Image (cartoon, grey):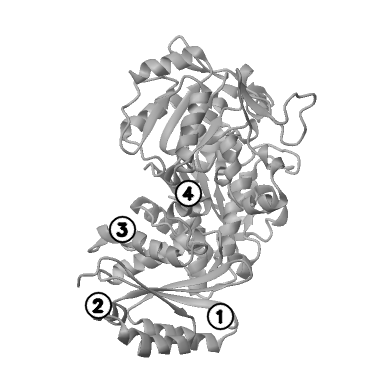
Amino acid sequence: MGLSGPVIRKIEDSESALDNFQWNSLPRENDTVREIISSFPTVYIHNWKNTSDYEVYIGETNNIFARTRQHYNEGTRTEQSWQSELAGRSASLYIIGHEHFNKSMTLDIENRLMHYLLSASAVRRVHNLRGNPQNKYYPADELDAIFSGIWRGLRRDNRELFPEESAIRDSAIFKASPLHKLTDDQVAARDMIVDRVRSALQNDQKGQIIFIEGEAGTGKTVLNSSTFYEIFCQAEENGNEGIKCRLIVNHKEQLTVYEQITAKLGLTDKYGEVVYRPTRFINKHSPEKPVDVAFVDEAHLLLTQGKQSYTGDNQLQDILDRARVTVVMFDENQILTTEQFWEAELLERYRRQARDAQNYLTLKNQLRMRADEKTLAWIDSFTKERMIQKIPASSANYEIRIFDSPDELEQMIQRKAGSRKTSLSRIVATYDWEYNANSKRAGRMKKYWEVMIGKWHKPWNRELEQNLSAEEKKKIRNLSWAEQPQTIDEVGSTFVIQGFDLNYAGVILGPSVKYRDGKIVFDSEASCNAKAVRNRTLSDGTRKKYGEILLQHEVRVLMTRGVNGLYIYACDEELRNALHHAEK
């Protein structure tokens, strides 16, 4: 047919405008365009603007005119439909076609548009249910190029509604979205969880645990959000809108991401509060009236002893007591504080309970880091075995580099952050310099809590917010730490970066990470992370320190953040020399 790019037409979203387009405008198009819109499958986007944001509905069809009129007719039958929202609004309809569109391709384009627009900051609500991502088909290998052409075309018309692809893909909402196309392993895990939940609810069971383990970057959060949303979608399709499904995470920034996702998908409007911090969930629910399903992301962050507002001694057990089914996402290598430390016997008890019910799975495929097996093995050796092996050569997708000074590291991260494709690049560090978010630094000479190495210094995370105007603070309110523009001039800790990705991670290994006698040493005395190095009271009443293992976990969290690369500066000279030697 000779058409290289997509066909995109925008009309007013009304029946009269559709009639005019079909009978007056379309006949004047050339034969190829007319055939693509009239006879090929198409994708469409209904969108309307409120005061400052958009709502959208995305679909695909074999007959754009019949399907759109069907939508208009459905809107006249109920005041609760998304179509009823169009009345009196500034609404438009995008009709999208391509000469290579077939049913499978349009379903994938529809799904990706839903995923992207859910992640767009200007979109308040996506009115679809879940998408229907496809497996292999011809020409699936053209999907990425065709979609990028469509997105660029849409962006030329409305840069607010359709931001840059790189900005979308780097957003925390995109990365945690339930609309991701899952891997085969994730699909199998999701189907198992849904099946177990259905069985437990049908048989009126209580206290069921589904235990999913996976290390950093193996897709636990996407599996968690996807399955959580799937439960709601299936309940709605089966007329069970009274289901009580809750999502729990003990991480402030991740909580905000989930709250945004559930609001944009309409779950908050339909079901009220569905996302909780653990203590709030425990305090708001009782064992006498358990919820149907509780999903616990980052379950390794749950408390295993009392603290301030939490008066219990095991948050996981308290959640199990308040849910008929509890789905747990867990990574033992990301436990960072004594309050989260699990005694081996207790943790194994929960694993065994899940295994006995055939409710235990392990996710093994690395989905975050674009690193080969040798590179992943090098990071494992450093962060688990405390050994420094020869650093593998950089590949086209991932690189490891060692720097002689924090200045050089900063310059490289600034350079990466200056590129649109790698703008989500930041410096992070071990917690080896003082920081207290709740108090001013008494008698300090400088304005901020800082990471200081010789003459080089840089504020800790959250310090530069105080310089922002009210309007600037409002703009960053719902962004993760790394997405906020001022944080390129800060140093992040595990408290803001755990659970999130970076394009390139510039990791400062502070004085607590040393190299002695051919081994990496984690020195609790050099750490400022009191929550990791203080004593932990065990169930038998004894007190024990776990600082070394928790600092080791801290380093692993930092070194597994980068999607494209890991840049390292080590304060300890022996460690720095050993790393340089490993580069040769």
Q: Tell me which amino acid carries mark 1.
A: Leu
- The kind of residue tagged 2 is Thr
Say which residue label 1 marks. Answer: 86
**Residue where numbered disc 4 is placed:** 170
Q: Quick check: can you spot residue 556?
A: no
Q: Residue at x 61, y 57 (%)?
A: 259
Does label 2 or label 1 sit earlier along the sequence? 2
Between 168 and 325, the residue placed more toward the observer is 168
Q: Which mark is residue 145?
A: 3
Q: Earlier in the sequence, mark 1 or mark 4?
A: 1
Tell which residue pokes out farthest to the right in this image: 443
Q: Is residue 31 above or below residue 317?
A: below
Q: Position of residue 377 (x, y in %)?
A: 36, 29
Check the image and report above or below for 67 versus 356. below
| 23 shown above or below 283 | below
Q: Earlier in the sequence, mark 2 or mark 3?
A: 2
Real-space Cα distance between discs 1 and 4? 31 Å
Query: Who comes first in sequence, dot 1 or dot 3?
Result: 1
Alpha carbons under labels 2 and 3: distance apart:
20 Å
Q: Which label lies toward us, 2 or 1?
A: 2
Q: Which image quadrant is residue 85 in? A: bottom right
Q: Position of residue 165 (x, y in %)?
A: 43, 55
CB-based contact (under 8 Å), mark 2 and mark 3: no
252 or 188, nearer to the observer: 252
Mark 4 or mark 2: which is in front? 2
Where is the C terminus found, in terms of image quarters?
A: top left
Q: What residue is disc 2 on? A: 32
